[in-house]
Amino acid sequence: MFGVFLLLSVAANIRSFCNGQTVPATSTDGSGIAILLTSQVGGYVVFECPVVPQSPQADAGIRPVVVRWTKDGQTVFTSSNGALTTDERYDGRTSIVESSEFSGIVATAVNVSSLRESDTGDYECHVTYSVGIIPQPSTPSLLPSKSSPRSSTAPSTLTVYGPGTPSEGVRFRLNVQGGDVMSIPPINQTRMEHESVHFSCVKEDPESTVQWYKDGVPLDDLPSLNGRFHVTPEGSLDVYDAAFKDNGFYSCRIVSAKGTLSAGAFLNVQYKAKIVYSPAEVFLAFGKPGTLDCHFHANPPLTKIRWEKDGFLFDTYNVPEVYHKLNGSLYFNRVRKEHGGKYTCTPFNDLGTEGPSTPMDVIVQHPPKLITVPKVVYFRNLGDNVTMPCEAERFDNKDPAIVWQKADGGSLFNPRVTVTGGNLTLTDVRSEDRGVYRCVASNIAATISVETELIVEENLFHRKHFDVHVNSTDKNIVAYWKRPYSLCTVWSRDMSSVTSNWNATTTSSEGKAILWNLDADGEYEIMVSCRDETSGESLFSRSILTRPKESIRSSQDSRKGGIASADYGPLEVRVQSSGTGYNVSWTIGNHSSEKRVKRYVVKWYDAVDGKELGSASTAANDRHIGPPNV
């Protein structure tokens, strides 16, 4: 075996942390440069020791075995294969920090917390490698050489010492301040439930005052600790009969004539996994997903959970569509009648369990089902009345509760509003009644709802609108709009009928929709509504009057020819597939006008967007067109 010792002469090449300052300093014996670390009582420091990494190219390269730290020449902690051993003076205050990589150097770091004034001193790390070939780096390392010290910002080189060669390690000088206020700070504590806990906080001046806090709150203000803690004359804290709710960060604050100092530590109370709550009844909705929770606490964390149903082990591996969630709950993908019964759960952790829950009676109940729902939208004028029906199916001789709400939170407590058997009636409709209404049906298993909207037509034409465009064929109308909403409704009404109301003709999410099988001689008013996802209300397009294109074209052509279209009578058109195309034939209704026809023109259009695709014409005595080979 031989030893390798590394000397670091610049602070820039190593990461050492404390809640104080880091500056270069000359060693007291003049043997080299040390890093000065300043902290206070109760603080922490991280000592990081660079290690030459093993060459990945050869198995015979050097291998780090032990990283040893000394304080004033005496070993205080040693790291070997990830395990850390410490001097008793540091018990409960040290831990290994995960290795980090910087500037091509691997480091082993030790964190020392709850610093005391007695921790002040000179620290040095020594790295020992197993026997083997030491690979020489092809480029200079960033570790410094004692023979050629550099400034705190200049790069350095690595000197590796073999057996018998004088060597030194990385040096730190730690200065812990505040010992004249607090001599011993608290350290982290782990205790079992019901045990007592002692946190040190020893004041130097007997006239000093000490105040203790848990998570920043004075202990006197915490009812959960009432009568279970005591502060000793020296300033330390004793907590009796520790409970799982006592977990947290405890800090003491000393105020003396020499200054004020605070220090703290964590309390970790461990206990067997335990049930904290069990409902007597749990209702799950038939045919819907459902969850049965096990309410527990565990520290250490949960390792497993055991479920029983009606006194027998309930193994989800043997029950279709039932699963364990990560938190131990049972998840039913689709609740069935056979899932009802009495369940218990028993949680476990590394310490064991305090036993099962009390039985939870799972009751499977049908969720509400609406059998009568309101229309999507109601149009009313000022002063009109409107009734919106809503009825739910009766299950197990119980009627679900039905409640009406206004989506914007507006009140329905109004003498003009009545609810009878689930139906909502508004009389003497006013402008403020417009908006989205929601019918909510619920029972103990689930809640469902359906929405409708009331449009007061007096206000419809005073609201912001967006444009809609139409194109039409002989019996279809295509509506287009440019509005970025996910789903819109196309409304239409036949203007030839005095009593015609707005009808929801179709819905679309593509920015266009087709109205089919319209009366060729009819005139229609078209409007599009899109739901605003923020307010829930509908935004309407401007309305537009239109009629099927054939009707428009016929009237235009008749004016050009000087002959009224009514003179020709109705045309009976027949379209038949011929395998290679279509045969179109027609007859004219008024045979007396047939002699005045010079020719027939047939045009065909795209049924989706109304675009003309082609045309053909025939002589006056030929009332047929088809593929050339027919």
Image (tube, helix red, strand yellow):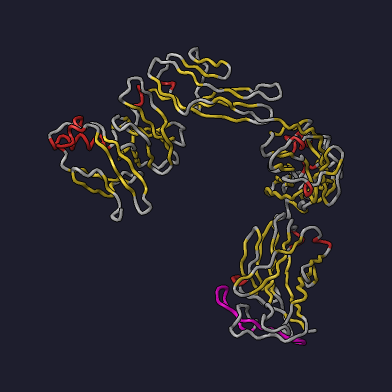
554 left or right, relative to 126: left
| Residue 288 inside the magenta-drawn segment | no
In-front residue for pair 25/377? 377
- Provide residue 601's location: percent of width, then percent of height: 22, 44
In-front residue for pair 363/154? 363
Number of dots carrying numbers: 0
361 left or right, relative to 100: right
Q: Quadrant of residue 130?
A: bottom right
- Provide residue 115's location: percent of width, then percent of height: 73, 58
In-front residue for pair 326/154? 326
The N terminus lies in quadrant: bottom right
Figure check: 437 above or below 194: above
> Which residue is rendered at x = 56% and y = 15% of the image?
420
Figure check: 142 above or below 208: below
> Which residue is rendered at x = 80% and y = 61% of the image?
90
> Which residue is rendered at x = 38% and y = 36% of the image?
516
Q: Main secondary structure of the magenta part?
A: loop
Q: Residue farthest to the top?
A: 415
Magenta residues (range): 147-164
In-front residue for pair 140/601? 601
User: In this view of the protein, can residue 202 be seen by the observer?
Assistant: no
| Residue 154 inside the magenta-drawn segment | yes
590 left or right, relative to 32: left
- Provide residue 399's location: percent of width, then percent of height: 66, 21
- Provide residue 286's location: percent of width, then percent of height: 69, 34
Q: Residue farthest to the left?
A: 562
User: In this view of the protein, can residue 522 be seen by the observer?
Assistant: yes
